[in-house]
Image (cartoon, rainbow, N blue to C red):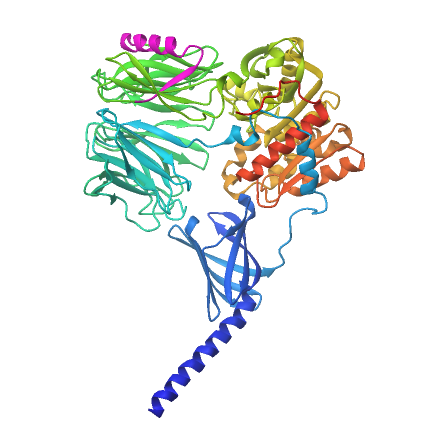
Amino acid sequence: MKKIKFKIQSILMLAFVALGMQFATAQDATGSWKGTLAVQGMEVPLLFNVSEEANVLSATMDSPSQGATGLPMDETTLVDKELTIVFKQAGIKYVGIIDGDKISGTFYQAGMEFPLVLEKTVKMIPGNTALPSSDEALKTLAAADSGNFKYSVADYFAKPNASSFNYSPNGKYISYMEKDKNGKRHVYVKEIATEKVTRAIEEKEELIRGYGWVNNNRLVYLMDQGGDENYHLYAADLDGSNQKDLTPFEGVQANFLELLKEDKDHIIISLNKNNPQVFDPYKVNIVTGEMEQLYKNEDIANPIMGYNFDKDGKLKAFTRLRDGVEQDLYYAKNDGAFEVIKSLSWKDAFSILSFNYASENPDDAYVVSNLNSDKSEIILYDFKLNKEIKKVFANKDYDVSNLALSRKRNYELDYFQYEGEKSIIVPVSAYYKKLHQKFEKQFAGKQFGIADATDDENSYLLVVSSDKLYGVYYSYDVKKDEFKLVYSLMPQLKEEDMAEMRPITFKSRDGLTIHGYITLPKAAINGEKVPVIVNPHGGPQGIRDSWGFGPEAQLFASRGYATLQVNFRISGGYGKEFLESGFKQIGRKAMDDVEDGLQYVIEQGWVDKNKAAIYGGSHGGYAVLRGLTKTPDLYACGVDYVGVSNIFTFMNTMPPYWKPYVKIIKEIWYDEAIPEEKIVMEEVSPVFHIDKIKKPLFVIQGANDPRVNIDESDQIVSALRAKGVDVPYMVKYDEGHGFAKEENRIELYEAMLGFYAKHLGQKTEVKQIKD
């Protein structure tokens, strides 16, 4: 008995000693620890912040190069001197041994291991914390936007309660995702004949990232673990039974590639199962989970980035990345081997839309190409002979992008699609021409697109939208010739209350044709000259503004402001020549186009030339600063949202994941190594011309922005305030390049509206109280 008692006392003593050791070491573990990961030639700085409360450790992680800060870790444990930090959402684990002010360990992610040494540091709050406007000051600014308006800021940015509507292939059911009171988005299946609704897939702790029908009884969906993006593909019957994880592999990401309409029990997916850095294609049985690897992606330095399968699941072509920038298109020969048939630069377009199954030649395909034209066009191409058969569709003013084929009617070509002033559908087949006429008559003045159709083409699911309508789903029954409302995505915004968005076209000062849009509040429609917010888009290369419902522009219109959006040179969709005419012209001729657009709408009598604001984010924010320094008397005020102010800093502090594209970025922007271009960089970098700004400026900055350093914004704010310029300054210490959190975005727009009210004058719109 004495021996047992002694043994228990010894165990207790050892336990207390162990606890004491852990507690002492926990004190050593607390604080901020910084280190740098070396990943494929790139350096990724990381910062772990470890704290202790009631002898329990917790940690957060900062990834400055990605603009992420304060990410809460799921587990932080200490055994002796071994510290383990786990971040399930990103599939990250760090294990290291503490030795004074150093931790030596290993960083694990997605099956890869990297050595990582952390050193103790003092975490500094980015920027000058004395500069940002106080919460009280920003609330006072927001209060300047006074009035009993029908809609709040939040009304314009609410997420729809239901979305992702689809038919079962036979048309007996319609499925959709719908939020419950806890924000969980479940997949529901509604039997159309009886209107019986069944919850087929329940979203629990993990989010459903996407879903779809494979056959009349089976659904597939993607889901990860804690947001780690290692998506698993699951299958379930339409009543929710027989659920199966089709890709039960730890640390592996699944992606959907091809739905095989000719094989109801299989689909084609990609997995990084063999090597976490590259993806291989697999054919998967959605009932049993059996899978077959279809090709090996073995060249890690030049990985395959995309696969092209035919309708029977045969791999016909793939695109391989070369030197991180260029691409090679491979096509299958008769013996099954693949050969390069196109070597493409980053400026080239040549991609397979669909194989031409109506042809007896299995090597015919519809391709989007700009290799022999300025605008992207659709051609019919013979891959066996490696030559163009004929041009199928092109537009003299715009790049074309898409087409639709009918499986039921032996893959007859139904229509082409491209984006001009609006989204344009060009009917081709006699069958679709009749349908299109019905759609146009029913939805006159609106844009519509086929979201889904049943296999027998008797039922169509349409999405209808416009400049005044966010989006509404309708069904169309061909036999009954009947349209039915399915779901309105933003019913709280009434179409009759929204503003008109008009396409505009004008000539630039050097003779280039420029397109854009102006959203006009009712006062402007009625002949009054209203204040205007000039809103250059981000990017800028290859990006364009489009006609349709814009929450920002509608919000501004509700307060009486017009919004001007110019697709200046370098914007996408207008051909190679127009795109490349903007290379080396950012802040120069591209900015001239924006100014010429403003002059055009002034001449039309829509806007007050003395009440023009300029607002934009990212490159648009740069355009704000450039506009206030290039033409300091043109604008009444400006709103710079995470805008570049120093092109030298922008080029030299890019995130690690941008490094493979530096060559491209220098071709588009400027290259400091070329003396003539260095002079231009100094000319068009607003930070060197702060003394020219004399109008009020609202600066909005994410403290952890990896592209626009907060010190640059601090510099602008300090210098302008010293000159007596009104500069409210909103900084969010939990944001990066753009605000992602809803509460921060709403606060941003509320303060922005107050700033406009203060410097553009109070609204003239009739104030309406929300029902």
User: For residue 436, which quarter of the picture?
Assistant: top left
**Which of the pair 13/247 is nearer the observer?**
13
Residue 13 coordinates in the image, percent (x, y): 45, 82
- Residue 521 in view: yes
- Which region is colored magenta? 429-452
Task: Please check the rendered image and state whether residue 449 is part of the magenta-colored stretch, yes or no.
Answer: yes
- Above/below status of 656 relative to 339: below
Outermost residue, right direction? 723
Identify the residue at horizontal 74%, vertical 31% (top origin). 689
- Above/below status of 42 relative to 763: below
Residue 529 coordinates in the image, percent (x, y): 67, 12
Task: Please check the rendered image and state whether residue 753 is part of the magenta-colored stretch, yes or no.
Answer: no
Total marks shown come to: 0
- Residue 509 in view: no
**Which of the pair 496/687 is nearer the observer?**
496
**In the visual, does 46 lie left or right of 362?**
right
Q: Quadrant of the N terminus?
A: bottom left
Residue 302 coordinates in the image, percent (x, y): 39, 39
User: For residue 298, which quarter of the picture?
Assistant: top left
User: For residue 630, which quarter of the picture?
Assistant: top right
**In the visual, does 586 lie left or right of 112?**
right
Residue 268 coordinates in the image, percent (x, y): 26, 35
